[in-house]
Amino acid sequence: MVGFPLLLIPLAIYNIIVFLMPSVSLTETLVAVPLMTSGAEWPVTLSEILLALAILMLLLEVIKGARPGAKFLTDHLLSLIVFGAAVAEFLLWPRFANSTFFLLTLLALVDFLTGVALRVRRSPAVAGASRAAQRAPVEVVHQPAHVESGASPPANEPASHAPSEPRFTHVEPAHAPAPVEPSAESKPAGAPLPPEASH
């Protein structure tokens, strides 16, 4: 969606006053605002109202341009066209050659340059974020088969996935070996013989 250049509003009001209401003066006091503290009166003219309106429109344009994806190339082109038209009116028409319209033209230039600066600054940040997302490693979490399939764990399996401690079982031998008596050859030479051997 293409955004509407808000700085066109005060410039259009100025053109309406110049071409359709030539008797209206921009420098005459419209209202005098009394100040509570000093007691003085603040005279407000039509040109000051237009400048204040243009500053508020510029603030809204900066807020719109600061949002991600809010400014397109067509928006910058429209702001440039508004600024070019204001410069042409300031140089060609005598009734536009005053300080009020010059300041309105300057605000239009600030609107165009601010939009371009915000776009240039945001583009490297978006590109860097996309490259970081592409380089980010993907963490793979291995889960038991019953968790991945959505089935409940078996009854004999504990609820926690912590590894169980190893169990050691002592196994007794089935038959103990019988004691082996030493033979006559394995006895020493000086050992006495048993009574059966002496007869």
Image (cartoon, rainbow, N blue to C red):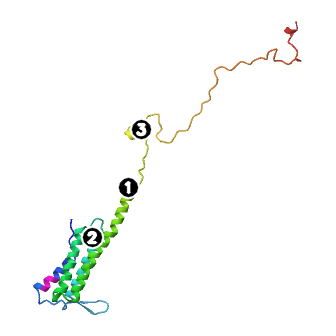
Q: Position of residue 76 (x, y in %)?
A: 24, 71
Stretch in magenta? 14-18
Residue 152 in which image quadrant: top left
Which of the two marks, 1 or 3, is nearer to us in this view?
Answer: 1
Mark 3 or 2, nearer chain start: 2
Residue 123 magenta-highlighted: no
Which secondary structure, mark 1? helix
The structure residue drawn at horizontal position 26% and vertical position 82%, both measured from the top left corner, is 106
Residue 71 appears left or right of 180 = left
Residue under label 3: 145
Given the image, on which type of amino acid does mark 2 rest? Lys
**Residue 116 versus residue 193: which sits nearer the camera?**
116
The structure residue drawn at horizontal position 21% and vertical position 79%, both measured from the top left corner, is 84
Residue 83 in which image quadrant: bottom left
Residue 17 magenta-highlighted: yes
Which of the two marks, 1 or 2, is nearer to us in this view?
Answer: 1
The structure residue drawn at horizontal position 62% and vertical position 29%, both measured from the top left corner, is 170
Residue under label 1: 134
Label 2: few (<14), some or many (≥20) within 10 Å? some
Residue under label 2: 64
Mark 1 or 3, nearer chain start: 1
Which secondary structure, mark 2? helix
Label 3: few (<14), some or many (≥20) within 10 Å? few
Q: Position of residue 22 (x, y in %)?
A: 11, 88
